[in-house]
Image (cartoon, rainbow, N blue to C red):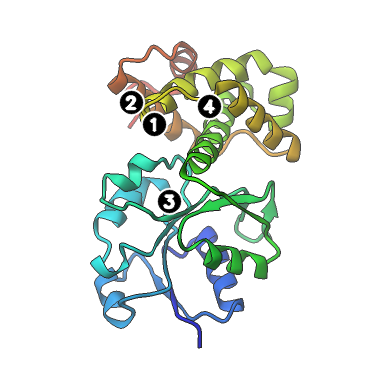
Amino acid sequence: MKDPVVVVGIGEMGGVFARGFLRAGRPVFPVTRGTAPEAVAAAVPKPALALVAVAERDIHPVLGDLPSTWRDRVGLLQNELLPRDWKRHGLEQPTVIAVWFEKKKGQDVKVILPSPVHGPRTPLIAEALEQLEIPVRVLESEQALEFELVRKNLYILTTNIAGLEAGGTVGSLWSRHRELAEAVAEDVLSIQEVLVGHALPREALIDAMVTAFEADPDHGCLGRSAPQRLQRALQLADDAGLEVPTLRRIASRHLRAGAD
């Protein structure tokens, strides 16, 4: 029998990975909201992988409570993720995937692009997704991983925030509202540069974002978390003393005063 895998958070995305691990012949031990991680760690102290599949708003409490024996075998897949997020918890080398497929309730998986992955447990992630015919792309360096994480953040934040103003699809955003999309993207990249601590290749990142637009032009811009994403972005901008004028203009039009 292959070594087991722990999946923390069995929502739509966690369920996809759990299914892949099971098809690959690996026992899966779930950690749900009502389950104490330490209780699962008592049964599975050293899994092949401890995949944290909770939503981005829950990532820091979960990482803070990870059992010590899981800390050198962590996998991460959240949106709005950057190296500083795992390093603040003392995790030096997790396995990280920038997910470019979606899974909605009652629907099958929809692939947009191959999902890039990097880290010591990469073969386990690839093994699971290959069982489901979900393509992955193995990255060779931490620098490449940072680029891909920023690219995904740029895509998510630009489409969600610009979508508050323009609505529609990513294809129509770029074809009909390109000036808005570019202005939002520049503000987003200003925030991302503060978070990674150095200048970013903006033109290459915007080109990579557009490649994702072209891969699925009918993808809707506006997710239900768009207002919260804009609020988080503005808080980060405030903390860094950034102007981000386009984000602030959109917020003045689409966020309720005093909203949490």
Q: Earlier in the sequence, mark 4 or mark 1?
A: 4
Residue 66 pos. (x, y %)? 28, 62
The amino acid sitting under disc 3 is Ala
**Residue occupied by mark 2:** 235
Q: Are marks 2 and 1 in contact (CB under 8 Å)?
A: no
**Residue occupied by mark 4:** 161
Residue 246 pos. (x, y %)? 49, 13
Residue 224 pos. (x, y %)? 52, 40
The amino acid sitting under disc 1 is Val
Query: At numbered mark 1, what does the secondary structure look like: helix, strand or loop?
Result: helix
Q: CA distance from mark 2 to mark 1?
A: 16 Å
Q: Earlier in the sequence, mark 4 or mark 3?
A: 3
- Is residue 93 shown above or below 14? above
Q: Which mark is residue 55?
A: 3
Seen from this angle, which residue lies furthest front? 140
**Residue occupied by mark 1:** 196
